[in-house]
Image (cartoon, rainbow, N blue to C red):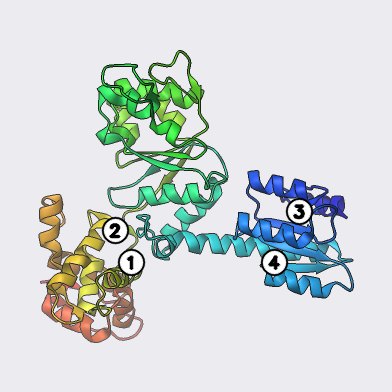
């Protein structure tokens, strides 16, 4: 039966493995990650229920399908209480097997996407509040994370400051076979050239003046896990050559040691710059770029996924209110419209800071547009926003464009803007947008006075 299941799954396109007993199964599961496990309760050696318990402890997200014989339904029910996904009763045909496995894999896929998007809700110690949302752009990032996580390929994450590059790197690590090992962050902008080798590769006691102890470098700290090189473009050209050699050889030249030491580390890098342009201007090595950019993930800026702003704002408010032990605050429709119109040069990080400021200055439990101070925040935090204009201009421009896109349908425009029809009418009047309602079927083009 074991080999028949293996053949059926392999022919269906699944990467499947088969082992004859529980001991080998646990050894394999301890060293690799599996989405689905078919577990026959009647196997030699370790009892099936013990195997199930251990598998669930190793990976609570693993879908374990229990195979049971006629007359042992009670055992299957017991397995369900221990966390089994479902059970197959012998004898079963290939279609039954494939149907159940397909269902389990699909469930795991959806659970991973949702856990990625809401990772921040489960781990307050990780700065993971930047991917909350359900936009198509965000879903694409999550799907790509799920695809690359099981591989050991290097990954280059690109995106503007505050867009969530470190979170994406952490998600890749947490879904990889390395998730039980360290995730080490290196701020490449803070690396000093004279201390680069000591910081990254470590040194032995007495290897240079001031080396009073043997010290591990970042690569050794990340042994078995993931090394995240944040803002990789900030590394000096001279240091890039040393880093390239380590990436190629997976060996570190520890200072004071006569020989290099092997390391097993996955490297994920991130940058907010265009590395192709940096290469053209001789500020970044082409060979290092190719080594780091085996897989590329781009995180879109918040202004390109404004439909995520309500979910993000709601999440931040809930979290901030809980931290301050105050009643949950709300955001007015006008304030939400302003937030959707604002370009967010600091991305999700700026959104969170703006809401925290608004909570402080707001009177009562409702945040209004006057509490957000977005124009002031942007000019102080990011300098003048050339070409953006004032916040009011941004909102007026957005309303005009949405009305035009909706061909004069105010209900559709209000829905797109996240406000009601009354608020939309008030804003049309406030900003002097010339707008004549047209009969059904005719288009109306709004203009600015």
Which one is earlier in the sequence, the residue at label 2 or at label 3? Answer: 3
Percent of width and height locating residue 4: 86, 53
Frontmost residue, 252 versus 206: 206
User: Label 2 to label 1, Cα distance in Å?
Assistant: 8 Å
* Element under disc 1: helix
Label pair 2/1, CB-CB below 8 angstroms:
yes
User: Label 3 to label 4, Cα distance in Å?
Assistant: 23 Å
Which residue is at 79% across, 48% downward?
Answer: 18
Question: Badge 2: how crowded within 10 Å, few (<14), some, or many (20+)?
Answer: many
Q: Which residue is mark 3?
A: 12
Q: Which residue is mark 2?
A: 348
Q: Is residue 19 something that shows in the picture?
A: yes
Q: Nearer the viewer, mark 4 or mark 2?
A: 4
Which residue is at 24% across, 79% downward?
Answer: 333
Percent of width and height locating residue 117: 44, 61
Question: Badge 4: how crowded within 10 Å, few (<14), some, or many (20+)?
Answer: many
Residue placed furthest toward the top: 258
């Amino acid at each position: 039966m074991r080999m028949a299941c293996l053949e059926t799954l392999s022919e269906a396109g699944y990467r499947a493995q088969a082992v004859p007993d529980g001991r080998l199964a646990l050894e394999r599961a301890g060293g690799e990650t599996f989405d689905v496990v078919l577990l026959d309760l009647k196997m030699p050696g370790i009892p099936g229920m013990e195997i199930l318990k251990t598998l669930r402890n190793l990976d609570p997200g693993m879908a374990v399908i229990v195979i049971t014989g006629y007359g042992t339904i009670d055992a299957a029910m017991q397995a369900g209480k221990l966390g089994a996904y479902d059970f197959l009763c012998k004898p079963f045909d290939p279609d039954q097997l494939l149907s159940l496995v397909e269902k389990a894999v699909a469930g795991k896929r959806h659970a991973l996407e949702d856990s990625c998007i809401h990772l921040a809700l489960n781990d307050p110690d990780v700065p993971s509040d930047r991917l909350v949302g359900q936009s198509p752009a965000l879903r694409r990032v999550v799907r790509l994370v799920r695809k690359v996580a099981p591989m050991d390929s290097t990954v280059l994450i690109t995106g503007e400051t505050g867009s969530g590059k470190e979170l994406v790197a952490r998600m890749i690590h947490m879904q990889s076979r390395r998730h039980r090992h360290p995730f080490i962050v290196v701020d490449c902008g803070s690396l000093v050239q004279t201390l680069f080798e000591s910081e990254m590769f470590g040194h032995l006691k007495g290897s240079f003046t001031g080396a009073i102890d043997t010290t591990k470098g970042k690569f050794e700290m990340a042994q078995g896990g993931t090394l995240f090189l944040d803002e990789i473009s900030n590394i000096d050209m001279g240091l890039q050559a040393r880093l390239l050699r380590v990436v190629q050889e997976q060996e570190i030249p520890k200072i004071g040691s006569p020989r290099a030491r092997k390391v097993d580390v996955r490297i994920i890098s991130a940058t907010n710059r265009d590395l192709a342009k940096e290469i053209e201007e001789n500020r970044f090595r082409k060979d290092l770029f190719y080594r780091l950019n085996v897989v590329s993930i781009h995180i879109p800026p918040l202004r390109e996924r404004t439909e995520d702003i309500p979910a993000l704002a709601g999440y931040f408010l809930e979290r901030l209110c809980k931290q301050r032990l105050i009643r949950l605050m709300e955001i007015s429709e006008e304030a939400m419209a302003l937030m959707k119109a604002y370009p967010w040069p600091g991305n999700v990080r700026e959104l969170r800071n703006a809401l925290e400021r608004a909570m402080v200055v707001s009177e009562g439990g409702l945040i209004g547009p006057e509490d957000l101070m977005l124009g002031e925040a942007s000019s102080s935090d990011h300098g003048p926003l050339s070409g953006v204009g004032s916040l009011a201009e941004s909102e007026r421009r957005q309303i005009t464009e949405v009305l035009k896109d909706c061909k004069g349908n105010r209900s559709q425009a209000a829905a797109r803007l996240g406000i009601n029809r009354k608020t939309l009418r008030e804003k049309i009047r406030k900003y002097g947008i010339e707008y004549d309602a047209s009969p059904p079927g005719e288009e109306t083009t709004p203009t600015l006075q």
